[in-house]
Image: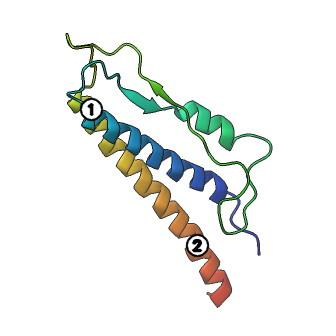
Amino acid sequence: MTPPPNLDALQRFVQFAVTREHAISTNMANVDTPGYHTKDADFQSVLEQTMSPEPAAWDGQASGPELQPAVREVPGLMERPDGNNVDLDRESMLMAETQLQYEVGIQLIKRDFHQILSAINGN
């Protein structure tokens, strides 16, 4: 039995959300660190990997090339006198957005597996 065709893309999307959440929480933890610059995961790099002609093989576990979203400094943010540019309001909004994206990805994966289970059970 083959997995649903979009499962690999959904897996990458959820992994991206986890990576982005980690970057955001690191930013929030460093709000008072002088010279710290805000970082964020690059969605464009994930999109390019997901749409590549040779997607990772699927055997029930992550295999093939691992998803490596680029985490980069965010340009154009206003710095405080100590050189730090973390804005807690911005980071809180991004965290809520990323958590919603993660939940959507998980729900779509659950739906795919529910369809497989229904096919197995003959429903």
Residue toward you, 98 or 86 = 86
Asked if residue 70 lies left or right of residue 62, the reply is left
Q: Secondary structure at mark 1?
A: loop
**Residue 43 in picture, x, y percent from top left:** 53, 34
Foreground residue among 44 and 41: 41
Name the residue: 70% across, 58% down: 63
* Residue matched to label 2: 113
Amino acid carrying label 1: it is Asn
Q: Residues within 10 Å of mark 2 (few under 14, many from 20)?
A: some
The furthest residue to the top: 81
Mark nearest the camera among 2 and 1 is 1
2 with respect to 104 (left or right):
right
Which residue does the numbered mark 1 point to in the structure image? 30
Say which amino acid is labelled 2. Answer: Phe
- The quadrant holding residue 3 is bottom right
Residue positioned 63% across, 51% down in the render: 9
* Rendered-image quadrant of the N terminus: bottom right
